[in-house]
Image (cartoon, grey):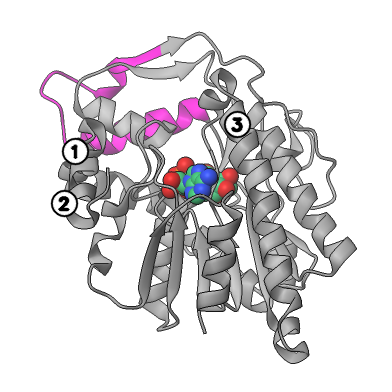
Amino acid sequence: MTILVTGGAGFIGSNFVLDWLRGSDEPVVNLDALTYAGNLENLASLDGDARHVFVRGDIGDRALVDTLLAEHRPRAVVHFAAESHVDRSIHGPGEFIRTNVNGTYTLLEAARGFWSTLPEAVRAQFRFHHVSTDEVYGSLAPDAPAFTETHPFEPNSPYSASKAASDHLVRAWHHTYGLPVLTTNCSNNYGPFHFPEKLIPLLIVNALAGKPLPVYGDGRQVRDWLYVGDHCSAIRTVLERGRPGETYNVGGWNEKPNIEIVHTVCALLDELRPDPAGPHARLITHVKDRPGHDRRYAIDARKIERELGWRPAETFETGIRKTVAWYLDHADWVARVQSGAYRDWLQRHYGET
Ligand code: NAD
């Protein structure tokens, strides 16, 4: 059998594809539009590996998605493709609606069409796994209990609103049409191949370049952090054992204020790559807060732990150490991502721009 992954050249998607093919010979068809956030270089270790079929295209292209489903007949769709950066959604929400809402709708309709043609026995085994975020639940008061799967949706940014809309569509396609869907709502990920516009890679990259480390407002915004490899293992677990129609929250029980993350990264860099100019924390610079910035997210992951036996393998301390070390070892990857040189690499390998 085969699985169809969307957005498999992005941060989490590429980690997922690599992780999947490390543990299984089941081929992956990877549909990705290669926006600024998609980077095929993340998957360079799969060059020449027949188990990975890369297709550059848009999830909103119904004819293309229909063709891929008909040709490859996947047993599951794992849907990562999205516009994912909150700041970008504030400045240009249109792309977020187009990909996250309309794109998910197109994918659902294509999947439903394909699924309805499957023989009865195979149909029951098919899965549409939607990868979503804890941001759909909105902001928590400091002393409020963590988000459970029944917490009301209260999205506050164009990004989280578009993801919430897609979650609702996925739910409706199950209840109305019977499509066997699964949804996971995960907290903030960090780890290898993270585009350096997001907090943790941005801190590492800027600190190494001696540039300011921007911290929004007072830096007391609290997030729950999960190592990307643990998110991948959670998705695999839910895909194999989750109950169709159910939502599973995924988190690392690692609630941390952003300012603590900044100091942790600085301390690790001081240890692993000391700067003769002084401790990296000297570069911390508080900047004007983001509009509508949620104060706190916290995930209650007891359902996936209890029902499916999933647990994260990394603590925050082990995961962040691995991550900082990865960025130090992959300075060439960072330089290429920043310079846009990976587009040249893409052209050399795939004749694309
Ligand atoms: P990312 O921005 O790194 O990657 C998104 C990928 O989707 C890119 O490769 C991009 O080229 C592709 N893409 C964008 N629009 C497309 C389109 N119209 N058609 C096909 N491909 C398209 O995102 P990420 O951080 O890897 O997140 C992946 C998914 O996980 C998203 O759905 C996001 O909402 C969700 N999520 C992310 C986090 C996090 O901390 N990063 C946490 C929870 C959930």
Dot 2 lies on which element?
Answer: helix
Q: Nearer the viewer, mark 2 or mark 3?
A: 2
Magenta part mainly helix, strand or loop?
helix
- In this view, 40 is above or below 265: below
x, y percent for residue 268: 29, 38
Residue 212 percent across, percent down from the top left: 30, 16
Give the residue type at disc 2: Arg
Judging by the rendered image, the residue that carries numbered circle 3 is 222
Query: Is residue 250 something one can see in this rendering?
Result: no
Do the CB atoms of the residues marked 1 and 2 lie less than 8 Å apart? Answer: no
> In this picture, which residue range is highlighted in magenta?
258-285
Seen from the viewer's position, the closer of residues 243 and 129 is: 129
Amino acid type at circle 1 is Ala
Is 34 drawn above or below residue 109 in the view shown? above
| Precedes in sequence: disc 2 or disc 3 | 3
Question: In this figure, which residue is indicated by the disc labeled 2?
Answer: 348
Give the residue type that dot 3 points to: Val
Instruction: Work out whether mark 1 precedes mark 2 in sequence or the reverse, and give the earlier one.
Output: 1
Give me the residue at 40% from left, 60% from top: 55
Classify 10 Å Cα crowding around label 1: few (below 14), some (14-19), many (20 and above). few
Q: Is residue 271 magenta?
A: yes
Residue 127 at x, y percent in the picture: 67, 72
Say whether marks 2 and 3 touch (CB < 8 Å). Answer: no
Question: Most extreme residue toward the front, as rendered?
Answer: 63
In the image, is 330 to the left or to the right of 9? Answer: left
Res 164 → quadrant:
top right
Q: Which residue is mark 1?
A: 341
Point out the image quarter for the C terminus: top left
| Number of other residues with Cα within 10 Å of mark 2, as a class: few under 14, some 14 to 19, many 20 or more | few
Answer with mark 3 or mark 1, whichever residue precedes in sequence: 3
